[in-house]
Image: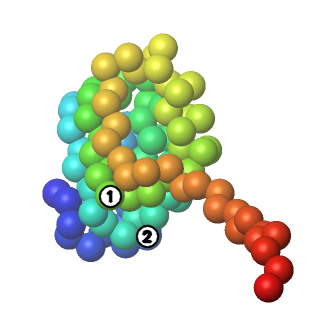
Amino acid sequence: HSNNRIPPEGVIRLAVGLRANKTIKSLNVGRNPIQNAGCYGLLKSISDNKDSAVELLDLSDIFVNQDFEDLLESMRDTFPALVVKRGRKFAAFCRVKSDKTS
C-alpha cells in the first residue's frame, strides 16, 4: 500500500521477493520514503525475473533519476505490459549567472 512509511531498508526485502515471485501483478509502494535507490532495486528485480507477472508498479510521488528511466526503457521489449507510475525525474538544476551589474 502507499504511504505506509516503508524505509529504504524495507524495500530491499520487497525487491528480493520480486526476483522470484511469479504471481504479483500490482505493487503500490508510492508515497513511501524508499528514494530512487529503492525504486531502482524494485525495477531491477522485476527485470531480473523473466517470469515476473508485474503489470503495475506504483511509485507515485517518488522522484527517480536517469538510471531508473534507462532501465525502464531497456525493459520495454521484455515487459511490454508494465506500467510504472512515478514522481518526476530528478533534474539537474543550474544557476545562471546574472550579467547585471548595478
Give the quadrant of the N terminus: bottom left
Where disc 1 sits, the SS reads: loop
Residue at mark 2: 9
Quadrant in the picture for residue 9: bottom left
Q: In this view, does 42 lie to the left or right of 69?
A: left
User: For the view shown, which residue lies furthest in the front direction?
Assistant: 102
Front: mark 1 or 2: 1
Residue ID at (38%, 58%) = 62
The Cα–Cα distance between marks 1 and 2, rounded to whole angstroms, is: 19 Å
Per the image, the residue denoted by label 1 is 61
Outermost residue, bottom side: 102
Q: On the image, which quarter does residue 31 sit in?
A: bottom left
Q: Report the residue at 60% width, 45% height from top.
A: 66
Amino acid at pointer 2: Glu
Q: Please give the name of the residue rendered at 21% of the width and 38% of the height, measured from the top-left corner.
A: 26
Q: Can residue 41 be seen here? A: no
> Residue 53 location, x and y as percent?
28, 27
Is residue 77 among what the camera can see? Answer: yes
Q: Earlier in the sequence, mark 1 or mark 2?
A: 2
Other-residue count near label 1 (Cα within 10 Å), few / some / many at <14 / 14–19 / ≥20: some
Work out whether 31 lies above or below 24.
below
